[in-house]
Amino acid sequence: MTDRLPSALPLAALVAVSAALGLIFLWAPTEAVQGDVQRILYVHVPAAWLAYLAFAVVAVASVLVVASGPERWDRVAASAAEVGVLFTTIVLVTGSIWARPTWGVWWVWDARLTTTLVLWAVYVGYLLFRSLTPPGARRARVAAVIGIIGAIDIPIVHFAVTWWNTAHPEPTVISRAGPQLTSEMLTTLLVSLAAFALVFACLLALRVAQMSARERLDVLEAHV
Amino acid sequence: MSEALGWLAAAFGVVWAALALYLWRLAREQRRIADRISRIEGRADDHR
């Protein structure tokens, strides 16, 4: 992964976010049962998918830390964990706001919500461990183990709605019967997913570049 | 109708607030890095 942010990436993210907002509020049809509240889907679902991706990046980078040493991959893992926690926070809060008018409650301890909260807590713990431990190979190795173990929860979160009876609906896009959305809704969701993916790439590249700069400065300050 | 829009505004507000907060944190870190570079450059000039 590059340690510099490609200049076209933020511009592409800005264009994609603008396009997604236009489609969400001006083009996507209003859902018959839930009404306008259902438009929360267009941020809730992409944020969840990008959170999965972020924690998968943590796991892969953590395996590389264990296999080949902490240089570079430790920075990637830590940066992806930060962005993953950010996106999971968005998922939990937007989900709660969506639940209140549709289910009548802010939260239920069903399998999907609980496993998502566990995923969030594991990676908050991962970041806390990193911030409270002196930098070095030992911190990188222990963090890598937490990062790998935490990722086991990703498939559990995803399949929780099919393995157990949950208040949370089953997948509406990736399901055996095909997408359960109209073509306009699906297009809007995919554009929003692209926008979130570009924002994710920007934040990850920026954070990796910052951590790299900080480590180089630590070395420089020790010598100047 | 207006209640639904209220919930929608709250959800999108949370998304923007979360992203803005993280970007603010990144910008603060960037300023710290710039300050450290300035200090190192100052010390290097003093050595010369």
Image (tube, coloured by chain):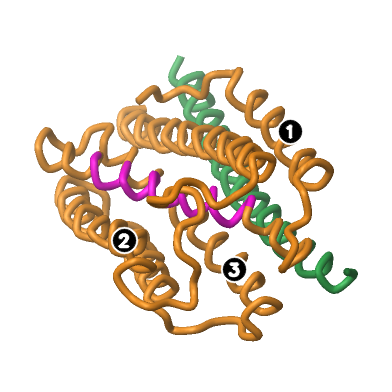
Q: How packed is label 1: few (under 14 Cα within 10 Å), some, or many (20 or more)?
A: some
**Mark 3–mark 1 distance (CA, rounded to whole Å):** 24 Å
Q: Please tell me which residue is depicted at 39% across the width and 44% down the height of the picture.
A: A53
Asked if disc 3 and disc 1 are in contact, CB closer than 8 Å, the reply is no
Please report whichever mark, 3 or 1, sits nearer to the chain's N-terminal start: 1
Q: How packed is label 3: few (under 14 Cα within 10 Å), some, or many (20 or more)?
A: some
Q: Is residue B13 magenta?
A: no
Q: What residue would you read off at disc 1?
A: A19
Q: What residue would you read off at disc 2?
A: A126
Q: Chain of mark 1?
A: A
**Mark 2–mark 3 distance (CA, rounded to whole Å):** 21 Å
Callouts 1 and 2 in the same chain: yes
Mark 2 element type: helix
Residue A54: x, y in percent? 39, 46
Residue type at mark 3: give it.
Val
Relative to A72, residue A79 above or below:
below
Disc on res. A104: none
Q: What residue would you read off at disc 3?
A: A93
Residue range in magenta is A42-60
Q: What is the quadrant of residue B1 in the picture? A: bottom right
Residue A104: x, y in percent? 66, 85
Asked if disc 1 and disc 2 are in contact, CB closer than 8 Å, the reply is no
**Quadrant location of the C terminus of chain A in the rendered image:** top left
Please report whichever mark, 1 or 2, sits nearer to the chain's N-terminal start: 1
